[in-house]
Each structure stands twice: as structure tokens, then as C-alpha cells.
Image: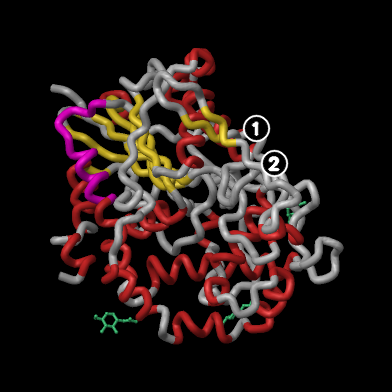
Amino acid sequence: MQLIFQNLAFALPLASSVVTAQNPGLGLSSASGVYNSSETPSTLPWNTYNFCNAPHINALHYAPPPLAVSAAGQLVHVSVVMRHHKRTPDNLAPSERALNPPMGWDCSKAVQLTYDLGGVAIAHDATTPAQHPFARTIWSGTCDAGQLTSGGLIDAAQHGKDLWELYHDHLGFLSVVSPEEIWVRTSTEDRTMQVAGAMLAAMDPLRAARGQPWAVHTQPSSIDSLVPAYPCPAANSIRDAFQAVPAWTDHLSSNVSLKARLDDAFGTADIGSWASWYDHFFDALTARTCNGHPLPCNDFAGTKCVSEADAAAVFAIGDFEYDYIWHAAENASTYNSLTFGAFFAELADALAVPEFSHRLALYVGHDGSLVRLLAGLGVVPLRWPSSALKSSLKYVWEVVGTRFVRVFHEGTVIKGMEWIPLEEFVGTLRLLVPDQLFERCMGD
Ligand SMILES: *[C@@H]1O[C@H](CO)[C@@H](O)[C@H](O)[C@H]1NC(C)=O
Ligand SMILES: *[C@@H]1O[C@H](CO)[C@@H](O)[C@H](O)[C@H]1NC(C)=O
Ligand SMILES: *[C@@H]1O[C@H](CO)[C@@H](O)[C@H](O)[C@H]1NC(C)=O
């Protein structure tokens, strides 16, 4: 008899740990956790929510399955679904340059490369000429909007080292860093590919030094299930409707003074995309604090600055909004299934195979990927998915012909998913895939 033990590790944004249980919700003025450094202070539990660099599974904190089972069972597959590491702001204020330190942002150690087999490696060297008529709309330095920063790249390398230490050194599960053992899926954004590249290079620096290309699997950007990026007008209507009721609009109308102070600093009054939710403020603030930049002032000379208290309020509201849209709102589960059904199906198909073709499947996506995965798996209440959040590590173990899954989030096993038959887990995923998804999305 053979033992099938399926151990799936998912990197999920919110741990079912102390911190998760204290999800602040709307009423609290500040969200618990770390927002200003990739390093969680040693005075806090190791798996404390860290928006800048989510805690992940590692050799030191890995909890093996119960001894009796692990003695008889065997790890056969690991899937990791994670968000990319920290980056620059994705949403630019109208006079962005004035909000940043004069030296701007540094991505010189996180250069984006484009290769063509047989051609040279093309490095994207982003600079904004000072005389450019539109220079005031973007910071100085070497970073584009939404680009992985040098710090993000360093975090990704450490993440790769930690994974290798656990699955190679400690568990002896991975033997060699090669496409035969490791299958990689990213979005079409450079930052997800850069993260995959940095992780793989840290796992095997010698292989990386030889410069051999590694094929990561992507989908066309117009239909990518992982972002997700496929069109779904029906889901948009559902979201519009549940964002038109007091359960949503109250938090906007009752925080007008906060919003006014933020607009004053960012110069964003009357811009709809900054007013319909706090997403842009959340992004603009956390990208700065995570990368060691000061909170912005409207002229960088220090008059109208965002206060620590206001930043903390934005972080808490960001958690409220993410939980509302993907979990708490009436019809949120329908919205989630429609917008992420294609990926739930992809994941279910990848797990429901007689034999795994790879030992490790690594998916590097975005906050929108992780928040949906977590919502689907019931890891609620939701918080904003941290950088590098591993939404799930599914360890598939074989025990006497049966496969079991353990699902991890932020390095910790998810309650209720400590040890479940793989079939049952796949069934859970299938339930999240609407019938006739295309027709339902397109309203046919
Ligand atoms: C981050 O914020 C905490 C709490 O406000 C503070 O104690 C700490 O010094 C800050 N760390 C950094 C690196 O700025
Ligand atoms: C949820 O969907 C139902 C059925 O379409 C609809 O009647 C209801 O108004 C929706 N709720 C919200 C808050 O949008
Ligand atoms: C925002 O509004 C909600 C009510 O909708 C309130 O509970 C919360 O305290 C407000 N937050 C801030 C930071 O003012």
C-alpha cells in the first residue's frame, strides 16, 4: 500500500493567529500589525500581520503533521500561491513629485529585464528627464509606478532561501532547482516575474549565475485568471449595487474630515477614483512606509503632512473595505466566485491529477488574487493582503493511497484545513466555480 499525504501550503494574507482575530473592522482607529518595515520586531510574534512582508512558512516555524501520520506518509506536492513583494505606489497623485523626497525612488537594484532567446537581455532603465514637461507628475529616481523596489527584491530573495531551506535542507522534498521539479506561474506584470526570478535565484545561486532562462507560465493579459483580469460586467454590476448601500457608503460619509485632510496633502480633492474608496490612499501610504519613505507632505517642506494617526486610520479602513467587498457585503460571495472562478477552476484542475508532474507549483500574483482566494477558502475576516502574502501552501501528503491536504496561511495551518482529504479540498474549490462562467459574466 502506498501512502498519499498531500500537503498543500497556501500563503494566505491573514493568519488565523492572534493578530487576525483582532481584525480591527471599521470601528477601530488603527489596524494591528506592521506597516513600516519588512522586518517584524522581535518583540512581536513571528507571524504577526506585516503588510510590507507577510510572514511565511520556514524551517524554524514549520509544524509537521502529527507524528504518526508523517511517519507513514510522504509529502508528494506543494503549491504556493502568493502576492509579489513590496513595490512603489501604483496610484499617482496629480503633483506626485512634490510628495516625494528629492532623491525619489530607487529601483536600480531591481532592474526589469526583457529577453528574447538568442538576443541580448534588455534592461529597462527608467529615468525621468528633469526637463520633461510632465516631470512634476512622477517622482525622480529610477522607478516606474507599481515597480518592485530594491527592498522588495531583497525580501523575495530571502523568501526563496527560506523555502529552499525548508523543502530541501529540512524536509528533503525538493532536490534540485529545475523546471522539472518546480513549475512557476505569474501574472504578466514584471513585478511578479521579478519575484519568481529572485526566489529561484536565491534557491540556487549557481544556476542563476549560468543565466539559463526559466519559462514561467502566464496567460494572455486580457483573460488572466490570476490577477484576475478577465472581463465580468455582471460582477461589476453586483459590486456597484453593494457599494451603493449604507453598509458601504456610511464609512465614506462619516469620515469626511479624514478625507479632507488626505486630499489636502495629496491634492486629490474631486478626483473620483480617490473618493470612491480608500484604496488609493492605502496604496500611496503603505508603499511609502514599507519602503522607508516618510509620510507625504503636500510640498515636501513639511506643512500639510499626513499624520501617523491618519495613516493608521487609512490602514484600518483599507481592511474594512477589503473585507466588505470580498466577504461581508450581501452578494460578496457571488462577486468573488464570478471574478475568481476561472482561477478556482485552474487550481482545482491542477490538484485533481493522478500524478503530480511537479513537486512545487509556485503562483505569484497580486493582492486581488490573494484576497479572493482567502475569501473563497473562508479565511475571514479579510485584511488587505500583505506584500508576499502566501495565500496558501497546500501540502499534499500521501498516506496509504489517500491524499490529504494541509493549507497554510501566513506560515500557520488554517483552522479546519489541518488535514483534509484532497478530494474534499478540490470539491471546495469546485463549488466556487459558477456554471457557465463566461455566459454569467457577460450577461448572456
Ligand atoms: C514603525 O512604527 C512603529 C509604531 O509606530 C514604531 O515604533 C517603529 O519605530 C517604526 N519603525 C520604523 C522602521 O520606522
Ligand atoms: C443582492 O442580490 C440580490 C439578487 O440580485 C438583489 O436583490 C439585492 O439587492 C443585492 N444586494 C445588494 C446589497 O446589492
Ligand atoms: C469612519 O467611519 C466609521 C463609520 O462609518 C467610523 O466608525 C469610523 O470611526 C470612522 N473612521 C475614522 C478614522 O474616522
On whether residue 345 falls in the magenta region, the answer is: yes
Q: Report the front residue among 265 and 250.
A: 265
Question: Left or right of 130: which side holds 405?
Answer: left
Q: Report the front residue among 152 and 301.
A: 301
Colouring rule applied to residues: secondary structure
Say above or below: 182 vs 376: above
Q: Report the front residue among 15 and 299.
A: 299
The overriding secondary structure of the stretch rendered in magenta is helix
Residue indicated by mark 1 = 109
* Residue at (39, 40) in percent of width and height: 186
Residue 395 in sight = yes
Q: Contact (CB < 8 A) between labels 2 and 1?
A: yes
In what element is the residue under mark 1?
Answer: loop
* Residue at (16, 64) in percent of width and height: 439
For badge 2, the amino acid type reads Asp
Density class for disc 1 (Cα within 10 Å; few <14, some 14-19, many ≥20) is some
Q: Position of residue 402 (x, y in %)?
A: 17, 33
How many numbered markers are drawn? 2
Q: Position of residue 108 (x, y in %)?
A: 67, 35
Say above or below: 119 vs 36: above
On whether residue 22 falls in the magenta region, the answer is: no
The numbered mark at residue 228 is: none
Residue 292 in sight = no
Density class for disc 2 (Cα within 10 Å; few <14, some 14-19, many ≥20) is some
Residue indicated by mark 2 = 106
For badge 1, the amino acid type reads Lys
Q: CA distance from mark 2 to mark 1?
A: 8 Å
Which residue range is magenta in the image?
343-357
Question: Left or right of 70: which side holds 281?
Answer: right
In what element is the residue under mark 2?
Answer: loop
